[in-house]
């Protein structure tokens, strides 16, 4: 009899593709592109480490498709109409193919909407949210946005990227349209059918433009957030959490060709704890696992459900009332996958602390892993428009953090 392989090490089909293990690298924007949105040395170095790190799938950070509306001054841009930008993407992907041919590479596409920073960008909104506001957009704007996502996806498929992650989380445009707060009377607001229209049209049109199912379509979804009337809430002004619509959304996307979902919670514009649990709120990890399980129970067995929000677990001991050896990232993830609660885990802040975690786990070198402390200095760097990374283990980002916070 062979030795049983632990669940995290088992390969898994994602749609028509195969991931070599159950580790996904979360999309993590680091605001480290150059001022024209192109790849910088910092961003190239970061992806080189991640692609060598042994994960089954790497999801590239929130990429903007227009310089006009974005949250970071140096956000990575994909502009299919700019030959120089296209060239940079082609070079990046062909080099990646050479160095990490067995890691799936997916790109997260995003529009920041009301979270665009007005100091260098244009803030637009679906319905003005107190404290944010912005220019109201119309159906033509949404249709053009869908067209730009489809064009970008088509280009990515042509240059050898394995799929796209459509962002419906964290309070960005995809999330702004879906939330019940979007009760404005227009083609993309009011009823659930109208609020989900952007997501559904987008998914359908990307699939139609790239019928080859080897090109993956997936979505990262905030199953609920902290905003009254936000995603996963019972009504436009409701504080009651009701994930029913988020589940319905994912089933609708699945029917239109999506083959993976990354579970998330929260709204980056309103607060970070629900999205990124830290030591002051360890119970939020169980909310992420529960949300992933809800998706797993509702979706087809062949659809891949990926749980996020787990970096806090680390080597164990973060959850009060639970022995360290039972509450580590590996112990809890292995048992949850074995029990069928979700299929894969996505690492966010932990991937900054140690991009090589999956490879170290595969090689039995767990003692060499640098565990994320969830200090959220990476988030501080990003929020202050600096290049983000791990300011605990990486001397480069330690210096960036030190310089920024002692000024
Ligand atoms: C610095 C930073 C950048 C992030 N960038 C993105 C992003 O580009 N897209 C996204 O969907 N989520 C982003 N997130 C959220 C993470 O992908 C992830 O959902 C969250 O950190 C929880 O996972 P963790 O506990 O493994 O860190 C970011 C988080 C941080 C701290």
Image (cartoon, helix red, strand yellow):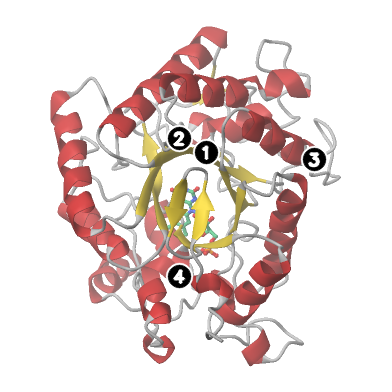
**Residue 138 figure quarter:** top right
Per the image, label 2 sits on a secondary structure element best described as: strand
Name the N-terminal-most of marks 1 and 4.
1
Residue behind mark 4:
350
Per the image, label 3 sits on a secondary structure element best described as: loop
Does label 4 point to a residue whose CB lies under 8 Å from ligand 1? yes
Residue behind mark 3:
233
Tell me if label 2 and label 1 are in contact, CB under 8 Å: yes
Residue behind mark 1:
167
Screen quadrant of the C terminus: bottom left
Q: What's the residue at 69%, 56% (across, down)?
A: 292
Q: Work out whether residue 186 or residue 286 is closer to the camera in this orientation and state it.
A: 286
Residue 236, how many percent across, how many down?
Answer: 80, 30
Crowding at mark 1 (Cα within 10 Å: few <14, some 14-19, many 20+):
many
Calculate the distance from the C-alpha at mark 2 to the C-alpha at mark 4.
Answer: 22 Å
Residue behind mark 2:
110
Name the N-terminal-most of marks 1 and 3.
1
Calculate the distance from the C-alpha at mark 4 to the C-alpha at mark 3.
Answer: 29 Å
Q: Is residue 192 visible?
A: yes
In this rendering, position of residue 173 left or right of residue 294? left
Name the N-terminal-most of marks 2 and 4.
2
Crowding at mark 3 (Cα within 10 Å: few <14, some 14-19, many 20+):
many
Does label 1 point to a residue whose CB lies under 8 Å from ligand 1? yes
Q: Relative to 301, does residue 197 appear above or below in the rendering?
A: above
Q: Relative to 112, does residue 188 appear above or below in the rendering?
A: above
Screen quadrant of the N terminus: bottom right
Name the N-terminal-most of marks 2 and 3.
2
């Amino acid at each position: 009899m062979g030795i049983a392989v632990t669940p995290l090490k088992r390969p898994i089909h994602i749609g028509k593709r195969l991931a070599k293990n159950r580790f996904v690298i979360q999309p993590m924007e680091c605001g480290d592109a150059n001022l024209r949105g192109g790849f910088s040395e910092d961003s190239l170095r970061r992806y080189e480490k991640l692609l060598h790190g042994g994960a089954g799938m790497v999801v590239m950070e929130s990429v903007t498709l227009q310089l006009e509306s974005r949250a970071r001054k140096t956000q990575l841009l994909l502009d299919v109409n700019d030959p120089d930008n296209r060239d940079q993407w082609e070079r990046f992907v062909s080099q990646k193919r050479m160095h990490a041919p067995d890691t799936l590479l997916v790109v997260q596409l995003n529009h920041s909407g009301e979270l665009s920073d007005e100091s260098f960008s244009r803030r637009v909104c679906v319905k003005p949210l107190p404290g944010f506001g912005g220019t109201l957009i119309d159906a033509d704007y949404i249709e053009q946005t869908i067209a730009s996502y489809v064009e970008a996806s088509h280009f990515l498929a042509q240059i050898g990227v394995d799929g796209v992650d459509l962002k419906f989380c964290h309070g960005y445009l995809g999330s702004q349209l879906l939330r019940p707060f979007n009760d404005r009377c227009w083609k993309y607001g009011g009823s659930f059918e109208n609020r989900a229209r952007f997501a559904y049209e987008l998914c359908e049109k990307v699939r139609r433009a790239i019928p080859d199912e080897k090109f993956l379509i997936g979505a990262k979804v905030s199953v609920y957030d902290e905003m009254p009337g936000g995603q996963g809430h019972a009504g436009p002004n409701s504080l009651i959490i009701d994930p029913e619509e988020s589940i319905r959304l994912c089933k609708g996307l699945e029917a239109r060709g999506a083959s993976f979902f990354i579970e998330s919670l929260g709204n980056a514009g309103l607060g970070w704890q629900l999205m990124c649990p830290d030591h002051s709120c360890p119970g939020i990890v169980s909310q992420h696992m529960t949300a992933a399980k809800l998706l797993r129970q509702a979706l087809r067995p062949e659809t891949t459900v990926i749980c996020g929000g787990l970096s806090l677990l680390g080597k164990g001991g973060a959850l009060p009332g639970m022995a360290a050896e039972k509450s580590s990232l590996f112990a809890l993830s292995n048992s949850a996958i074995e029990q069928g609660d979700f299929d894969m885990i996505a690492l966010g802040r932990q991937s900054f602390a140690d991009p090589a975690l999956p490879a170290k786990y595969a090689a039995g070198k767990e003692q060499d892993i640098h565990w994320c402390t969830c200090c959220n200095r990476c988030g501080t760097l990003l929020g202050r428009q600096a290049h983000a990374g791990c300011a605990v283990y990486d001397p480069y980002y330690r210096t960036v953090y030190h310089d920024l916070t002692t000024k």
